[in-house]
Image: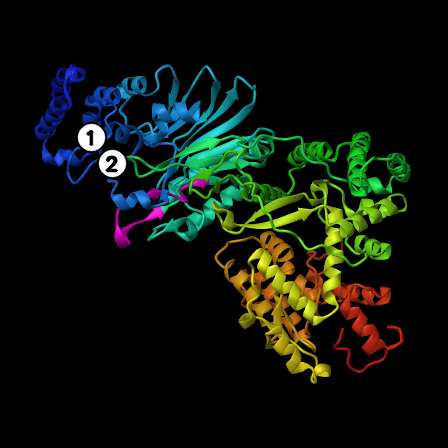
């Protein structure tokens, strides 16, 4: 029957009284005797392990012994197993190379005194403690002395503990449930307040629904405070969050996704381990799952837009700790941006003339830079008079949140707002792996290293005219992204009468001297992630935002290279030598007109490309020389069918299906409809798919309760507001008609239509049996 519990505890209290005076070998001998005293069948139970851990508590914490378990030997980390894990984990050598484990607020390293001290942790959540109520005080006294604690021992087993440093933060428990503890956290130094919910979800998906219901009720009550929900949800969102065999059902995943959407929560970006739990098995039985997450509401992202969390490596637990961090990037005052609305103000030209009339000693380009810098002060003052757009937008957003709560608007508005905030947080750069292989997350080190180069650039010696310079400025869109100086092309176009002469002189000076000021040559590098969890520079797609004058100079240089095929070939070669990006002739093709058959072979020999033929796929759509056929539109139909196939298992209401049709399905064919006249048979198929999904929830055909023409009417006319594909296609085609009427000089297609089709006629008088060219 084994040793009775009361007798066993009395015997071991005497043995553990002088543990601090024993040597390591004596303590290990005592531990071995303890194991032999216990019945083998009891050796595998949690109760036995918990008792043994309490006996060894004082010694292992004081000595800091850090050994591993091998085979059936005793693990000296039982103190951590007792408090933070359901069972000890055998850490084999190959486990150390895996970038996965489990982020949970309950793990040995999360509550280590060293980790708390090094990371500056002031608030702690511990899950799955498995500590009996009688031993709680002694365990806590050895872990974090002087801290305040709270637990949920009203539930089974005290599943959740929270601890905090009273000197730094204040905690007010607002709500307690078997699966979560909801509290208010106050930073005493900054007087900032937020709401924290520590979650330990049930393993059963049916009982877990009570967790979703409780958190959903909290979300409806929280409208103005930043809120963070974190912990072990024991659920995944989709199959991509698990590696190996998983028993999670699609219904449980859908319930988790629905809760996140309805509660208006988004995933906080993380660093470290992509998976957060391991079942301690090897081979085909191994399973890695992301069970633990940190979710925040949109108000949290407004207060701490750069916040993230770290999934650290596990120690003796099958889980990894979660370390929530605030804004790791120091906020700056922001760079100057020229708002295009300033160019439309009555006193804009007078303001520019007042600054531009001053004489600056130095070369012409230096004078332009100084005058632009002086104008920044003036434009900043005008922005304050009109109102800071950023502050106004922030104020309007706060007002909109209050109005939305009062009017109880549709949840879809919250959904799209959260998606925007989540996208911004997801695309923010939090860490980079440097050349030495170390991850760098400090904002002071997140920059490109300075390098010296002695390469000399070839000077452009051909004279540049003022007309060419003006054309370079006026041919670029006004709304193109500004460079580091903040000025857009709208400013230069609006003030050209005052600054045009100086700008032309400065640009001409560059082509004569070959020198460019660093203020003009400055570039703002934007990194766009290409993967889900970027950690290397190669995981980002760099985009350089240059100043307007730099863009104009580049445009002038590029315009010189389009005069002949030989110049284009030379430009490609020079680009490959400078950037290291070489054109692959084997994958490149050139499509020639029938009018150049005599020079066909010469062009192919010069370019080194293969000759191609239409149709080809460009920017996701087929390029053909005639009307589109049904076969050409098959990729569009396949895309719609794939999207509908993913929605078949969703039990959506009629309103939900209508919203998906209007926001998702309608956007799939809009790009095609803005370029081509879609065949009527394709339009019929697309509307048939949309009609079937509206009434049956699937792509298969079925009985329609209302005609499609009635559905496409506006809500004021008794319809659902779904746009007709045919009418949308016709409306988008008017854009091309407008370009022909305006004789757009930038469009090669418009020039071809005017020369080869209309031939000195107007589009109103043109008659043709076939107008496939449009």
Where residue 307 sits: x, y (%)? 53, 34
CB-based contact (under 8 Å), mark 2 and mark 1: yes
In the image, 360 versus 115, the foreground residue is 360
Quarter occupied by residue 78: top left
Tell me if I can see residue 416 in this picture.
Answer: no
Query: Horizontal placement of 650 versus 617: left or right?
Result: left
Where residue 328 sits: x, y (%)? 53, 31
Between discs 2 and 1, the one toward the N terminus = 1
Relative height, residue 223 to residue 762 (above, below): above
The tag on residue 361 is: none
Relative height, residue 533 to residue 196 (above, below): below
Residue at the image position 57 percent from the left and 69 percent from the top: 635
For disc 2, the neighbor class at 10 Å (few under 14, some 14 to 19, many from 20) is many
Quarter occupied by residue 155: top left
Query: Horizontal placement of 197 versus 673: left or right?
Result: left
> Spatial distance from mark 2 to mark 1, Cα to Cα?
10 Å
Q: Residue 723: say if magenta.
A: no
In the image, 611 versus 80, the foreground residue is 611
Q: Residue 274: say if magenta.
A: yes
Where residue 162 sits: x, y (%)? 40, 24
Query: Horizontal placement of 196 versus 596: left or right?
Result: left
Residue found at the very far bottom of the displayed protein: 598
Query: Horizontal placement of 538 versus 626: left or right?
Result: left
Relative height, residue 146 to residue 369 (above, below): above
- Residue annotated with mark 2: 88
Q: Which of marks 2 and 1 is in front?
A: 2
Tell me if I can see residue 542 in this picture.
Answer: yes
- Residue annotated with mark 1: 49
Residue range (magenta): 271-288
């Amino acid at each position: 029957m084994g040793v009775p519990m009361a007798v066993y505890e009395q015997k071991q209290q005497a043995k553990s009284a002088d543990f601090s005076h024993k040597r390591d070998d004596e303590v290990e001998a005592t531990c071995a005797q303890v194991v032999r005293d216990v019945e083998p069948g009891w050796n595998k139970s949690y109760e036995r392990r918990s008792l043994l851990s309490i006996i060894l508590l004082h010694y292992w914490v004081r000595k800091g012994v850090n050994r591993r378990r091998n085979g059936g030997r005793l693990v000296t980390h039982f103190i951590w197993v007792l408090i933070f894990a359901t069972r000890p984990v055998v850490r084999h050598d190959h486990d150390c190379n895996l970038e996965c484990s489990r982020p949970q607020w309950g793990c040995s390293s999360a509550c280590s005194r060293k980790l708390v001290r090094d990371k500056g942790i002031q608030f702690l959540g511990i899950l799955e403690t498995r500590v009996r109520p009688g031993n709680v005080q002694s365990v806590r006294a050895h872990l974090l002395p002087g801290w305040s604690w709270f637990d949920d021992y009203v539930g089974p087993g005290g599943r959740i503990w929270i601890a905090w440093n009273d000197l730094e933060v204040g905690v007010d428990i607002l709500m307690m449930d078997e699966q979560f503890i909801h509290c208010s956290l106050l930073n005493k130094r900054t007087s900032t307040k937020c709401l924290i919910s520590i979650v330990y979800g049930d393993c059963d998906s049916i009982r877990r629904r009570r967790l979703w219901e409780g958190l959903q009720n909290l979300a409806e009550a929280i409208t103005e405070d930043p809120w963070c929900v974190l912990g072990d949800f024991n659920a995944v969102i989709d199959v991509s969050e698990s590696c190996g065999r998983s028993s999670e059902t699609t219904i449980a995943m859908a319930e988790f996704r629905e809760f996140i959407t309805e509660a208006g929560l988004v995933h906080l970006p993380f660093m470290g381990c992509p998976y957060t739990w391991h079942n301690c098995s090897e081979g085909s039985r191994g399973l890695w799952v992301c069970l633990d997450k940190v979710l925040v509401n949109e108000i949290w992202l407004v207060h701490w837009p750069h916040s993230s969390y770290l999934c650290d490596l596990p120690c003796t637990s099958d889980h990894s700790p979660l370390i929530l961090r605030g804004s790791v990037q120091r906020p700056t005052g922001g760079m100057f941006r020229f708002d295009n609305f300033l160019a439309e103000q009555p006193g804009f030209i007078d303001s520019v003339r007042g600054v531009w009339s001053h004489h600056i000693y130095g070369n012409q380009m230096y004078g332009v830079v100084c005058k632009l810098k002086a104008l920044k002060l003036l434009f900043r003052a005008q922005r304050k008079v009109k109102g800071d757009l950023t502050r106004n937008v922030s104020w309007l957003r706060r007002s909109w949140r209050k109005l939305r709560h009062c009017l109880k608007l549709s949840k879809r508005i919250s959904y799209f707002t959260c998606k925007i905030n989540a996208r911004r947080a997801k695309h923010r750069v939090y860490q980079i792996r440097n050349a030495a292989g170390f991850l760098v997350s400090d904002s002071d080190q997140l920059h490109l290293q300075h390098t010296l180069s002695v390469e000399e650039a070839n000077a452009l010696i051909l004279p540049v005219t003022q007309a060419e310079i003006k054309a370079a400025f006026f041919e670029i869109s006004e709304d193109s992204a500004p460079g580091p100086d903040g000025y857009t092309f709208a400013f230069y176009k609006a003030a050209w009468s005052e600054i045009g002469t100086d700008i032309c002189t400065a640009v001409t000076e560059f082509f004569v001297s070959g020198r460019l000021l660093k203020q003009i040559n400055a570039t703002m590098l934007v990194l766009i992630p290409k993967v889900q969890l970027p950690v290397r520079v190669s995981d980002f797609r760099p985009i350089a935002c240059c100043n307007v004058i730099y863009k104009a100079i580049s445009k002038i240089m590029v315009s010189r290279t389009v005069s002949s095929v030989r110049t284009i070939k030379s430009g490609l070669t020079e680009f490959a030598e400078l950037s290291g990006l070489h054109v692959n002739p084997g994958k490149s093709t050139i499509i020639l007109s029938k009018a150049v058959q005599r020079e066909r072979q010469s062009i192919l020999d010069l370019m080194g490309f293969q000759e191609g033929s239409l149709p080809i796929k460009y920017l996701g759509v087929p390029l053909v020389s005639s009307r589109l056929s049904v076969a050409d539109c098959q990729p569009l139909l396949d895309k719609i069918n794939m999207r509908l196939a993913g929605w078949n298992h969703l039990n959506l209401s009629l309103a939900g299906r209508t919203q998906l049709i209007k926001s998702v399905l309608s956007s799939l064919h809009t790009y095609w409809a803005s370029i081509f006249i879609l065949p009527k048979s394709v339009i019929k198929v697309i509307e048939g798919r949309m009609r079937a999904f509206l009434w049956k929830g699937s792509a298969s055909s079925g009985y329609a309760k209302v005609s499609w023409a009635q559905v496409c009417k506006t809500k004021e006319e008794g319809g659902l507001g779904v746009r007709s594909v045919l009418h949308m296609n016709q409306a988008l085609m008017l854009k091309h008609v407008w370009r022909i009427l305006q004789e757009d000089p930038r469009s090669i297609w418009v020039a071809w239509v005017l020369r080869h089709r209309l031939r000195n006629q107007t589009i109103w008088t043109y008659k043709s049996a076939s107008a496939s060219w449009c």
